[in-house]
Amino acid sequence: MRRAVLFAAMLAVIGSLARASDLPPDKQRSSYQDMAPATRAMQDADTDNPAMLWVLDGEALWQTKAGNAGRACADCHGDAKQSMRGTAARHPAFDEKLNAPVNLEGRINICRTEQQQTAPLPYESKELLALSAYVALQSRGLPIESRDPRLEPAISAGRAEFMRRQGQLNLGCVHCHDQRFGEKLAGSTIPQGHPNGYPIYRLEWQTLGSLQRRLRNCLTGMRADNYPLGSPELVALETYLMRRARGMTVESPAVRP
Amino acid sequence: MARALINIPPKAKRGEIITIRTLISHHMETGFRYTTTGTQIPRDIITTFVATYNGEEIFRADLFPAIAANPFITFTTVATESGTIALSWSGDNGFAATEQVQITVE
């Protein structure tokens, strides 16, 4: 009898270990599907989606000459509708010079410092959000890609971060977003935590925000030590989230409650 | 200049009820918040929205601090004749924005 109980307990442990594995692609669910009809309607119509206000700014910035080089994004990249198609769906991407993955915001800032020869834009500034929203819009409707083998070390680092218990609540991302999605946390449906709509217009923020802002939100909620915006840890986490969400449709710029 | 998104059907039948949807960028600072050092952040909101159809006022709204950032205002009107629908927002610190949209009524 005692042996049977022990065996059942061992099975339960193995079961919980198996549950800690990665989210299978057939279980992927965009939080769009859990939103209220009114919030979905906001995202669906471009004239109702407040994120499009940033896109308009981004479109203007794309054409604005900046820096010592006196060049605009458009001077090198031309029409963003063609040149930036799919860009957001494959970022963070591997940068050979830095020998590390670089997210979309980082890529824009590399262009600013190296090509335009001007100061990088601060994270969550109106300009950087506007440019990243404009670039991300060009990938809307495309599937998320995560193929580059050079990203694997960052993906494993990000995955370890995702699985790691941290903070005063002693939680890992995995405990909510892989194991308890669809359940409730203080009345809100727990999402799977996919990066498929960033930058998002979050109703709670009443403004547009990046994926890193959202990640830092979660870390604060877990009462964990936070990483600064743009830190390699957050980029690694982004890289893992893109791998976890591969194949999902980009919704950027999305609306979230 | 504040950005605005406006959705008005470019064409309508005479007598048809049309829906006008507007969204404008504005941070709608309530005036009730304080900075970390304790100074009050002054109120900065849009206070009035007016829509005119060929110069005639068809809709007016007063806005208050409880209204969220980037206010979305939608209303309906009857398409009576071709012309211009002008939308204007005004608010604290001299905020003013105007947008005009042409409509053809057949």
Image (spheres, coloured by chain):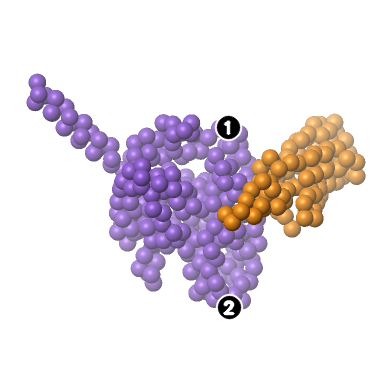
Chain colours: A purple, B orange
Question: Residue A100's spot in the image, x, y percent?
Answer: 36, 65
Picture quadrant of residue B9: top right
Query: Which quadrant of the rendered structure holds the C terminus of chain A?
Result: top right
Name the residue rendered at 40%, 35% in the picture: A181
Chain for disc number 1: A
Pick the residue in front: A170 or A68. A170
Position of residue B82 in the picture relative to residue A101 (left or right) = right
Q: Determine if residue A239 is in view.
A: no
Q: Earlier in the sequence, mark 1 or mark 2?
A: 1
Q: Is residue A100 above or below residue A237?
A: below
Amino acid type at circle 2 is Ala
* Label disc, if present, on residue A37 of the rendered structure: 1
- Say if labels 1 and 2 share a chain: yes
Amino acid type at circle 1 is Pro
Q: Is residue A55 above or below residue A4?
A: below
Pick the residue in front: A243 or B26. B26
Instruction: In the displayed orientation, state which residue is furthest to the right.
Output: B55
Q: Alpha-carbon neighbours of circle 2 within 10 Å: few (<14), some, or many (≥20)?
A: some
Question: Residue A234's spot in the image, x, y percent?
Answer: 40, 56
State the SS at label 2: loop
Q: Determine if residue A128 is in view.
A: yes
Query: Which quadrant of the rendered structure holds the N terminus of chain A?
Result: top left
Name the residue rendered at 77%, 55% in the picture: B93
Residue position for label 2: A69
Position of residue A218 in the picture relative to residue B48 (left or right) = left
Q: Is residue A102 above or below residue A162?
A: below
Name the residue rendered at 64%, 68% in the picture: A64
The residues tagged by marks 1 and 2 sit, at their Cα atoms, a distance apart of 47 Å
Position of residue A23 in the picture relative to residue B93 (left or right) = left
Name the residue rendered at 41%, 31% in the picture: A183
